[in-house]
Amino acid sequence: MSKQSKNPTSSDDTQIDLDAEFRKSNIKEVLDKLDRELIGLKPVKTRIRETAALLLVDRVRKQMGLSAGAPSLHMCFTGNPGTGKTTVALRMSEILHRLGYVREGHLVSVTRDDLVGQYIGHTAPKTKEVIKKAMGGVLFIDEAYYLYKPENERDYGAESIEILLQTMENNREDLVVILAGYKDRMDKFFHSNPGMRSRIAHHIDFPDYDADELVAIAKLMLADQNYRFSPAGEEAFGKYVRLRMKMEHFANARSVRNALDRARLRQANRLFIGTKKALTKTDLMTLEPEDILASRVFLEGKPDSGSSAIPEAKKQG
């Protein structure tokens, strides 16, 4: 940092190159990565860019002696499963690190089971151990509303919340907490825990994907694993997605990932039992309509086995 940047009484007409500061921070690389990783989600990406801009300007203000105190960076991500909340949290941790708001920039992702004990004296050590691991980075608490169970007087979630509140207030310069979950449940959680609500500065809602976006997501997922759809296979998958979206326990990108896993199994079986034993690289890479249309979604009008909400909710965020 230059001598001038340390001077709290620098002249009002002192200039600083914001573009140069932006380039120096390398946050463009993270924002570009977010664009590549996630299809759609325009309002989410806009909010992340706005937050990054706010933090960059805050850093520049500090250099000009205009510090207004550490900004509150704790966040809440709301939306259905599979809408990219965990991925965005990971990229947010990188942005915070590159701008100097957290020391290490790692992400620790947990649920209630990682924080709350089952007997007296168990919760505080569990919660403090998780906080210790997350310190210097971002603590991402999925399905955070499960921490509060007022109907169960023997539940210890309130103890975990109290420790988190103290940490969020006293360690704002060394830890950012991101709560995540369904919007209606998070609203209820904040209504019952005003102390937590007052500490959350940024609320970002993640919309569901539409069918075309889900097909595009599927193509990205396949490309990462050196697979692809044939033109007819892609058309069949589009039909699959539109039917699956109307059924129970649909979880956006998580359901797409599960569907692709089953399609790859069917493709492997088709190739194994088929008459063509000399296979090309294209054969090994390509998912055909029959690999999609054999799903129970088409045959029985219901999700494939294993499509329950619980296993899907445990997969990628």
Image (cartoon, rainbow, N blue to C red):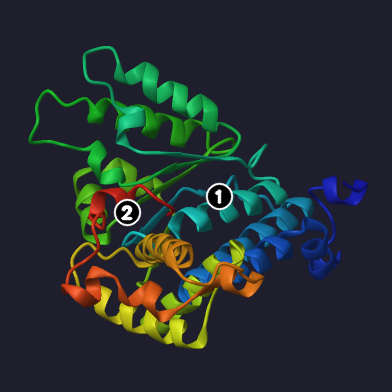
The reply to whether residue 292 is in sight is yes
| Amino acid type at mark 2 | Glu
Q: Position of residue 167 (x, y in %)?
A: 45, 30
The quadrant in which the C terminus is found is bottom left
Q: Position of residue 100 (x, y in %)?
A: 70, 45
Q: Position of residue 110 (x, y in %)?
A: 41, 38
The reply to whether residue 50 is in sight is no
Residue at x-position 22% and y-position 25%: 156
Residue that numbered label 2 is attached to: 312
Few, some or many C-alpha atoms within 10 Å of disc 2 (few <14, some 14-19, many ≥20)? many
Residue at x-position 62% and y-position 62%: 52
User: Which SS class for mark 2?
Assistant: helix
* Image height of 109 relative to 60, above or below: above
Horizontal relation, residue 4 to residue 225: left or right: right
Residue at x-position 42% and y-position 60%: 265
Residue at x-position 53% and y-position 66%: 221
* Image height of 262 relative to 140, above or below: below
- The quarter holding residue 278 reads bottom right
Horizontal relation, residue 103 to residue 144: left or right: right
| Amino acid type at mark 1 | Pro
Q: CA distance from mark 2 to mark 1?
A: 35 Å
Residue that numbered label 1 is attached to: 71
Q: Position of residue 55 (x, y in %)?
A: 63, 57
Nearer mark to the viewer, of 2 and 1? 2
